[in-house]
Amino acid sequence: MTNTPVAASTWAAGDYPAMAGLLAPAAERAVAAAGPVPGTTLLDVGCGTGNAAMAAARLGAVVTGADPTPELLAVAAGRAREEGLGVTWQQAPAERLSGVYDRVVTVFGAMYAPDARLAAASMARCCAPGGLVVSAAWTPDGFMAAANRAMGRYLPPPPPGAAPPTRWGDEAFVYEQFAAAGPAEVTATVEHVRLEFASPVEAAAFWVRAAGHVRVERRRLEASGAWEALHDDVAAVFAEWNRAPGPAVRVESAYLLAVVRGGAAVTSPGRRVSER
Ligand SMILES: C[S@@+](CC[C@H](N)C(=O)[O-])C[C@H]1O[C@@H](n2cnc3c(N)ncnc32)[C@H](O)[C@@H]1O
């Protein structure tokens, strides 16, 4: 999880599969919003270890999972094989997708594309006439952004001009990206992923272990004595956002679930329909 675009390779440097286990409910929710029926073709963009792809395949959809990180695609393929689900995998970022599908879903995936407009245009191009694009992205004022700000203080500065991925958690931003590619209508709701741990300290240890872009800085941070301070700061964010009584942690991490309709069915130049 990061609040600045990072090289796709760092996604494999941490324990992302463990994090994916926590985020599975959001994938289920996004797939439900896409509403595939048996035979629906569906593309999961930034599929990671395959949460949404597998949820859709379980419903009988004909699924392709796309991601730029080969190590995560390999985990996804292994999981699907184990469950006997037939999914096609494609190594590609959101900006360079191929094929045409009834539904295009991205769960905390396309938000990491450095060029948001290109990613939206690519997803719109891959969406069949009358189809839907469904995007789940952390909100800019939610827990995930706060945790990333805390970790970001220990990391190298983002490249010049880099924009925070959480802009995809803003409905107006999502609308603008798709409207630039053609007529678009966006319906959005704010949903939450529940994160539970035994304590803020345990939560911070899990969080840092899962974050590849932080793990790659470990040696430098340990040498400068900042590794423990990083953990303390992340634990403090969990404590601040905690809604559980006692020593345990329960955080509701907000994300924007946006459903985008495009094409001729939309009254040009399109509109934004908020459900919030
Ligand atoms: C937070 S993970 C989400 C994975 C999965 N969708 C899930 O719900 O668990 C972010 C994913 O975005 C992928 N990613 C990074 N850059 C991307 C890009 N430009 N286009 C699409 N996906 C990208 C990473 O490889 C990683 O798998």
Image: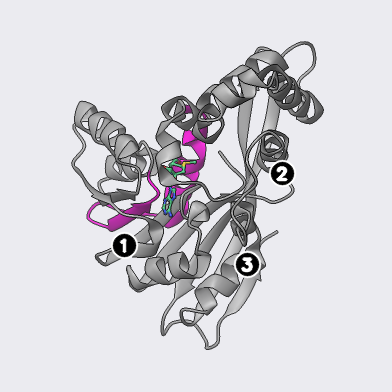
Q: CA distance from mark 2 to mark 3?
A: 16 Å
User: Which residue is painted at 69% across and 14% down in the image?
Assistant: 201
Which residue matches tag 3?
A: 173
Nearer-N-terminus badge (2/1):
1
Hey, which residue is sitting farthest bottom in the picture? Answer: 268
Does the image show residue 274?
A: no
The region drawn magenta spans 21-47
Is 115 placed left or right of 2 in the picture? left
Q: Which mark is residue 97?
A: 1
Q: Nearest the camera: 172 or 161?
A: 161
Ligand 1 within 8 Å of the CB at mark 3: no
Would you say 73 lies left or right of 33 here? Answer: left
Quadrant assignment, res 196: top right
Q: Which residue is mark 2?
A: 142
Amino acid carrying mark 2 in the image: Gly
The answer to if 22 sits in the magenta stretch is yes
Q: Amino acid at mark 1?
A: Leu
User: Is 273 situated above or below 207?
Assistant: below
Q: SS class of the residue under badge 3?
A: helix
Label 2: few (<14), some (14–19) or many (≥20) C-alpha neighbours in 10 Å: some
Q: What residue lies at 70% left-to-right and 22% top-to-bottom?
A: 226
Kindly identify the residue that appears in the image at 78 percent across and 24 percent down: 236
Contact between marks 2 and 3 (CB within 8 A): the answer is: no
